[in-house]
Image (cartoon, rainbow, N blue to C red):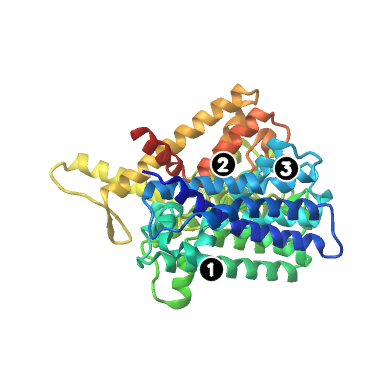
Amino acid sequence: MIRPLVVVRYVGLILLILVGFMLVAGCVSCIGGPDQSTVPLFFSAFIGLIIGIFPVVFTKGVPSINRREGYAIVVIAWLLACIIGGLPYLLYGDDFGIVNSFFESVSGFTTTGASIIDDLEILPDGLLFWRMSTSWIGGIGVVMFALLILPSMRGVGNTLSDMELSSIAKDNYHTTKRSSIIRLLIITYCVLTSIAAVSLHFAGMGWFDAICHAMSACSSCGFSTKNASIAAFHSPVIESIIIVAMTCAGIHFGVFLSAITGKGSVRGFSSSLKVYLIFMFIVAILVSLSLWNGQIYSSFLGCVRRGLFHVVSLTTTTGFAITDTNTWPAFCVVLLTVCSLICACSGSTTGGIKIDRMVIMAKSVQRRILRQRNPNRFYDVRIDGRSISDDRVEDALNFIAVYILIVAVGSLLFTGFGNDLQTSFSGAVACLGNVGPGFGKVGSVNNFSGMNAASKLVSVALMFMGRLEIFEILQLFYSHRKD
């Protein structure tokens, strides 16, 4: 049974963290004098504060919550964060109506990076920084920040972190202390973002652009401060730094701590990490050769540069661009679509199916073939020397099946609302996988501004389901129906 007051209290606490980030963006808008986003940001923060503070003041905390309450808190907190996060856009005005404001907010918090903004460079710094902040918050999750910062939430931390962390990511940690996992994730996240920001600054970006792009790259969102994205800087060095940052964002964060401390904080990541890196390397070679064979660019080095960048960008669900991929051969388009479906590792900031699930599926198929050869012999699914339970295998296969089904439904809805097939399918893949750019009208140098309101709302639903990994939402509704 769900206790509504308990859910409201902890949603309010989580919302207060969001208000804190919004106030930081408001302060950024005041640097050099208030800009046009100052009032929208501070007024939105005030509204968020009022909504968040009342349930905290007038309801009591509890020592523990049940799993259904955990699902409700996480889903409602994410939804409310997206609504409150859209207020600065709505109050700023211009092209930001209700649907567009909500779309941009959801795209940021889910780290999708899809946009409805045609001219980024006319936006004030405060709004641009808030836009980046939503992506950086979403990379780890506003719930995770709240669990680390607010002592009053520690009593319910295990349950909420179970809701936020995917089962396949949690399964890799040795430690059973969720507080250690949360601390590990956020420290690693902050360090990676800081290193990326400093590197980009010394590569030629101003501090504002460097910090914004570091936040976007490490959250695997792909938001930029420039209309032309990373191509606006015309710098192979900046592109290389972005490639490294995106690649790191796609790796299980526990790997970094293990490499630094040597304590082996995570287990079972070797196969997935190897497949992830080898997969990107092979696809990048194939894309580069296809571009060279099709004479898309004048030099082979130019083909490699662009091919590698976009393969890493889509595999890590970041979505940065340095060229128009709509002009690429169909072979490249198919390969990049596969990248957008499979994506990177669990325990990272990326979306999509995840390499880990694909490895489990491949091992499961291998087991099936071996059983057909020798029905009387027992075979288990083993990864990195350890046996994977049948429940974990079933979870992975069910997720992949439902994921593909939702892509198909999303594609159908997009076409029903007047979009062409390429735009519809790639858009569904890009939104559910939190990738951002697709092909056709939502290609790497385009955005979602040309879609009608119904298509944008379908995109929002797909982005939301993709960020919460589908079953978190389905579990909540299933629980209600079961009662």
The image shows residue 260 at horizontal and vertical percentages of 48, 76
Front-most of residues 59 and 360: 59
Q: Which of the two labelled residues, at mark 3 and mark 2, occupies the earlier sequence position?
A: 3
Q: Is 136 placed left or right of 279 in the picture?
A: right
Amino acid residing under circle 2: Met
Question: How far apart are the two marked residues, 3 and 2, measured between alpha carbons?
Answer: 20 Å
Label 3 secondary element:
loop
The image shows residue 4 at horizontal and vertical percentages of 45, 45
Front-most of residues 299 and 51: 51
Q: Which of the two labelled residues, at mark 3 and mark 1, occupies the earlier sequence position?
A: 1
* Rendered-image quadrant of the C terminus: top left
Q: Residue at x 68, y 35 (%)?
A: 99
Q: Is residue 434 visible?
A: no
According to the picture, the residue beneath numbered tag 2 turns out to be 463
Report which quarter residue 149 is drawn in. bottom right
Residue at the extreme front of the image, as rendered = 58
Which one is in front in this view, the residue at disc 3 or the one at disc 2? Answer: 2
Q: Residue at x 26, y 41 (%)?
A: 369
According to the picture, the residue beneath numbered tag 1 turns out to be 188
The image shows residue 27 at horizontal and vertical percentages of 76, 63
Residue 456 vs 338, above or below: the answer is above
Q: Residues within 10 Å of mark 3 (few under 14, many from 20)?
A: some
According to the picture, the residue beneath numbered tag 3 turns out to be 445
Q: Which of the two labelled residues, at mark 2 and mark 1, occupies the earlier sequence position?
A: 1
Which one is in front in this view, the residue at disc 3 or the one at disc 1? Answer: 1
Q: Are the residues flagged by discs 2 and 1 in contact, CB closer than 8 Å? A: no
Amino acid residing under circle 3: Val
